[in-house]
Structures are given as structure tokens and as C-alpha cells.
Amino acid sequence: MHRYALFVNKIPVGVLGASGYAGRELCALIAGHPRLSLAFATANEQRGVTIRVAGHPIGFVATEDAPLGDAELVFSALPHGASKDWMARAQAFGARGVDLSADLRPGNGCEGIAYGLTELNRQVIVGANVVANPGCYPTSILLALAPLIKRRLIADGAAIVANCASGVTGAGNSPKRELLFAEVSDDFRAYGVGNTHRHLKEMRATLESWGANADLIFTPHLLPVARGILSTITVPLTEPLDDTLAPWRDAYGTEPFIELSETPVSLRDVLHRNVVRISATLLEGMRTPTLLITSAIDNLVKGAAGQAVQNANLMLGLDEIAGLPA
Ligand SMILES: NC(=O)c1ccc[n+]([C@@H]2O[C@H](COP(=O)([O-])OP(=O)(O)OC[C@H]3O[C@@H](n4cnc5c(N)ncnc54)[C@H](OP(=O)(O)O)[C@@H]3O)[C@@H](O)[C@H]2O)c1
């Protein structure tokens, strides 16, 4: 069994599902983190395999063999359904946990768990034993919408339309025919159409908890790139805005991981960074004042492993930005 927690001044953390895309990103962030060390890394089919991350060899053990008691905090990057029980087991060993799966998120039958939209929930996250890390699409959409809801700028009963395009790492690395290179390349397609994507439950529950009275029409698209999410969101407003970025400037101030842009954002702005980048434009020719927001994240960083480390930093009393690429 590989043991990595040999650094006296470092806090040992474990990664469940370390061989997946989100898990590997976690291992890379932990390897470069000034205060965390990797206590264990698990895999399922890839158990027994050793990979190199940032120059460090990482050996994957079976989840059943993970020394849960060696970690102060356990990240779970297991698939939905498999994660919840392992979070409970880690807690039984006295570890705190950050769950990257949907199992514990709002709208998924586990209300009352701290929701890890860091910029909006810090006070709860700091003292939490378990944090439900948000989904990648919800991160890009909810961080973009929150300032408008806070200022009650969204028209009552409005339909918010979110068209979002994600790179293929969003679907995980287990083989799927529709994700083969020849199927994905030179193409661009919508999926989960008809408001059927599982992230809707999480977003609806969160919007409701914020007091928003609006419908959400969410259509994800598969973009033939490895990583990144670009969300284009149209929002009917109660009144036109003279300064379209003012709600975000007021809400987020000098947040280290939120960037505002005068021009529409692109994936290149955010790849391999723990940021969400947001722009807003008032649409011309509309009878109802309507805002078009673009919001970009790296699905594996701010949309998964980066935000998870940001939450873990808070839970462990570390500098929130420690080890995170800004
Ligand atoms: N990818 C993203 O952009 C993203 C963003 C936000 C949240 N998430 C969430 O993060 C979690 C991981 O996503 P991912 O994209 O990294 O998935 P993935 O690439 O498919 O990785 C899944 C991981 O879980 C392991 N695993 C699979 N079934 C298991 C089982 N029954 N018991 C124990 N281990 C098992 C896999 O091991 P083997 O590979 O060895 O089989 C692998 O390490 C998911 O819940 C996902 O929804 C993903």
C-alpha cells in the first residue's frame, strides 16, 4: 500500500475515485498544495495501477482497502449513487468529507448538507463535517444568477434560459460509444433536452432556497474539446440596468476566484484555473428588458476539484486560496 502522508506539517487527505477525471485533478492539486498531502488514492477497475501526477507516483488502491482513518478529510470523486455510503464510512472513521458527486447536493434527497458554492456559503462550509460540492453546470449558472436574485432583478415568473456547452471530460472517463473521438469531433450537439438533465434538481432547489420565482430552461451541449463549460444565459429583468456588471461587482467585490469581463467570455480565459468568469449584456430589441450573461469555468477545476479544494481549505482552517490556480 502506498503511503503519502509523510509530511509532518501537512494535513493528510484521501481521494476516492482518484483514477477518474475529477479524481486525477484532485490528486494534481493536492500534489502542488503547500499544506495537504495525499494519504490514499482509490480506483475501481484501475486498482493496482500507478500513474504519475505532477512528477509524483500515485498508486491506486481498491476503495475497500482505503485507510480511511489515515485522512483528516476525504474527497469523494466516485459516481453518483456510489459516493454517499463512502462519505458516511469516512465520517465514521472521524474524517471530514467533500463529496463531488450529486448524492448529497440540494434537490437530491439529502437536504441540510452544506452546499459548497464557496463564495456564497462560506460561513456554513467553515464548520461543516461534510460538504456537497456543486455540479459543474450549476457552478457556472448559479454563481452567474445569484447577484440578480439577491437584488430581486429577475422578473416574477420569468423563464431563465441557460444553454451550456461542456467539454467531454464532463462525462467522466468510463468508455462510452457516443464519446468516442470519431463521434464527438467535428460535431456539436445538445443532450438532456426537454429539461431532463439531472443537474436541474440541484439548480431548482438552490434557486428556490434563494427565493427566486422563475423557471429554468437548461439545455446542455457537448463541445468537442477536452474541458471547459461556457454557459449562455438569458434572464428577463424587472428593470433595465445602466451598469450591467454592477450586480456582480456589488455581490462579489474582490473575490479571488470570480472575474468580471466587459466582453463575452471564452473557455481560453479559464482553462486550468479555479475561476468563474462572467460577462453581461443588455439585449437590444426586447419588449422586456433582458440580460444575456456568459459564464465560463473549467469543469474539472472550479466545476469540480478546484472548488472542492477551496471548500476543504476553509474546512481545515487553511488559507482559502492555498494551492489553487487563480
Ligand atoms: N467530470 C466532471 O467534469 C465533474 C464535474 C463535477 C462533478 N463531477 C462528479 O465527480 C464524480 C467523478 O466524476 P468523473 O468525471 O471523474 O468520473 P470518472 O472519470 O468516471 O471517475 C469515476 C471514478 O470512480 C471510480 N469508480 C467507478 N465506479 C466505482 C465503484 N462502484 N466503486 C468504487 N469506485 C468506482 C472509478 O474507478 P476506475 O476508473 O478505476 O473504474 C474512477 O476513479 C462524479 O460523481 C461526477 O458527477 C464530475
Image (cartoon, rainbow, N blue to C red):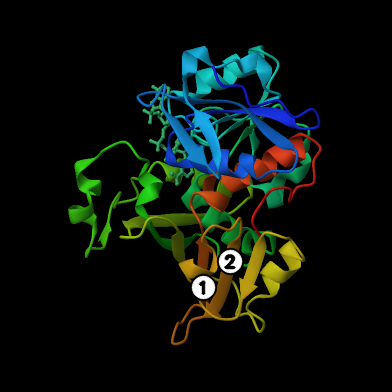
Quarter, ligand 1 = top left
Residue shown at the point (67%, 82%) measured from the top left: 243
The local secondary structure at tag 1 comes to loop
Report the front residue among 165 and 271.
Answer: 271
Residue shown at the point (35%, 60%) measured from the top left: 225
> Looking at the image, do the residues carrying marks 2 and 1 touch, with CB atoms under 8 Å apart?
yes
The residue that disc 2 covers is: 277
Compared with 168, 113 (above or below) is above
Residue shown at the point (42%, 63%) measured from the top left: 161
Query: What kind of residue is marked 1?
Result: Val
Q: Does residue 185 appear to the left or right of 87 in the view shown?
A: left
Query: What kind of residue is marked 2?
Result: Arg
Q: Quadrant of residue 125?
A: top right
Q: CA distance from mark 2 to mark 1?
A: 7 Å
Residue 234 visible to the viewer:
no
The residue that disc 1 covers is: 265
Q: Quadrant of residue 153?
A: bottom right
Q: Does residue 217 appear to the left or right of 325 in the view shown?
A: left
Q: Position of residue 264 (x, y in %)?
A: 51, 77
Q: Position of residue 123 (x, y in %)?
A: 78, 42
Q: Earlier in the sequence, mark 2 or mark 1?
A: 1
